[in-house]
Amino acid sequence: MRLRSFSRKQVVLVAVAAATAAVALSPPRLALALVFAGLAVLALGVATLVERQRHRLSEELGQVYGRLDEMTRDRHDEASIARERDARIRQTIQEAADACADRTVEGLARLERKRARERDREETSPTPAERRLADAQDLLWTGYSSQGLDRLRVLGAAPEASPEVRAEAHKTLSNWHRATGTPDSARDHAHLADLAAPRAARGASGVPSLLTARIRAPRTARHFDVVLMSDFRLPGGTTGSNLQEIDAQRNAGLSTGLVHHPVLREDQSRGVNPKILAAVDNERVRFVAPDERVTCDLLVVRFPLIGQRPMDVLPSVEAARRIVVLNQTPNRRYGVGIEGNEAWDVGRCVEGFTSLLGEHTWHPISPRVREAMVRHHAAEMAGIPLAEEDWTNIIDLDAWRRPSRRAADGRVLLGRHSRDHRDKWPDRASVLAAAYPALPGWETHVLGGAKVPEHVLGALPDHWTVHGFDTVDVRAFLHGLDAYVYFTGEGHLEPFGRSPLEAMAVGLPTLLPESFRPVFGDAALYTDPAGVREAVEALMGDEDRYSRQVRRGHEVLRERFSHQTHLRRLAGLGVRVPAEFLEAPGTSGTSGANGISGTAGEAGALLIP
């Protein structure tokens, strides 16, 4: 048996057993010596074992340190490589950014050059109205004068044309009439050119028309049945009311002279509203130029702010009767303080109108204006008489009414139209939400803009549809509704309410606050915003109720606000209205339904320097 076949443990055990036996069997001294020798050998063996273990551990530790050094060097190399890579990436990005910036600047420059070329083309390319003007001028000067003149007259009042184009059309007409020996027509169109675009048409008549009044001999005096003085630039209800009276007078065979008096507070470069220009035919209806002297049965001034600062240069008008229509209250709101509350100063207007007109009377446009003047401004009127009858607005009921209500389709369409002004809208979100409720199938349609309610509400509701001012024909807009709802700002005293009048004329049940009852009586329905839903549901659910309200509204309008009503009050003030245009012969000296009573009185002269 070989030694290697025994394990180290077995050898050690045998050795220990042999040593133990030797010690046990030896004499004491020899045993002690053997023990010490054994301990020495054991100590030497342990020391040798420890040294070997230390040496082995030292070698392993050295290897660990070597590996750590190697790893440190690797990490350092990797960090260096990463820094170099990062630097290269940054450099690449910067180079790309520089290249991109160069390309962007170049691209923007190209885009700007393109836009500039497009602007140049737009500026040099004629608009459709300018092409129509050039075509009409070509017809005029190449022998087709009748066609050219007709087209120029239409273009001179076209709302889609710019004021400059309208003015140029009238300048061309003026030049034509001057060349063909009709100087009066030439002066008429020169004046219309100045009115269409005061800034663009300067010099249309050789020198500004306000100066020609001082240097040219006046025309032969012409007589008008009615002369209407107003600011004909205005876009809203005043212009609509002026047009209705002009039409009523023209249809009755009466002549109307128009004196344009722009108020000083407005932009003086603005031209006359093209709707007014379209009503001028230079026969029954004509603007009175500053160099004219005319006579009339009645001079009507519509717009009280005119009296606050009358113009220095106006035509000379000799009028049998003179009135001022108060179509606006002196304050915008009563009982509520707001900035800019004063619309016109009563004392200054008393002074201005007395200087301008001499003896005259003031006619409120509605019971609401009358109440405001009596309650709040009587002391300021300084003896100016307030007429007993109101000068209410009128409307051509037959032209406005729709043949039948909108066809049912499961929806309820509420609507309103007005200027987008803070006075025309409720001030609180809760009132707007109640007046125009968000219900399934209910829609609210607005004509005139809605920036004010958008500000009040924070955002316009999804069930609202909004059209800008004058972007849709008013009659067409109203014909597509089921009911009309109109509430205004707290404390605002709506002088009359032309917008609700038009809605009732179309045949829409109209819901108003109670304060309108003195104006429209049974023609409207009166409620607060919280009652709108119930009132509309009652109308939509009962065809007979709906029809009765439409019929009642038309009856009231025909009695109080018709063209015949206007003709009767003209007759009551001395205008010679043909009898066939009055409801009954012989009413010229008496009061009809809401007409003007009294006689013309003594003739007086209005000489405006």
Image: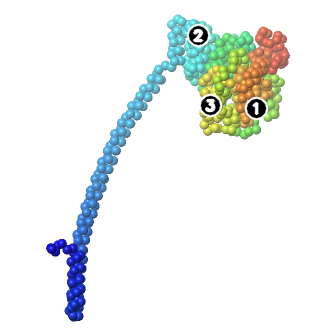
Q: Position of residue 264 (x, y in %)?
A: 66, 29
Q: Position of residue 220 (x, y in %)?
A: 69, 11
Which quadrant would residue 335 be assigned to in this image?
top right
Secondary structure found at label 3? strand
In this figure, which residue is indicated by the disc labeled 3?
A: 464
Q: Amino acid at mark 2?
A: Asp
Q: Which residue is mark 2?
A: 150
Q: Which quadrant of the figure contains the C terminus?
A: top right
Q: Is residue 468 above or below residue 22?
A: above
Disc 2, SS: helix
Pointer 1 local density, CA inside 10 Å: few below 14, some 14–19, many at least 20: some
Q: Residue at x 71, y 26 (%)?
A: 540
Q: Residue at left 75%, top 16%?
A: 563
Q: Earlier in the sequence, mark 3 or mark 1?
A: 3
**Residue neighbourhood size for the residue with mark 3, other residues' Cα within 10 Å, grouped as few (<14), some (14–19), many (≥20):** some
Label 3 sits on what residue type?
A: Trp
Which image quarter holds the N terminus?
bottom left
Mark pair 3, 1: CA separation:
22 Å
| Res 528 visible | yes
The residue under label 1 is 527
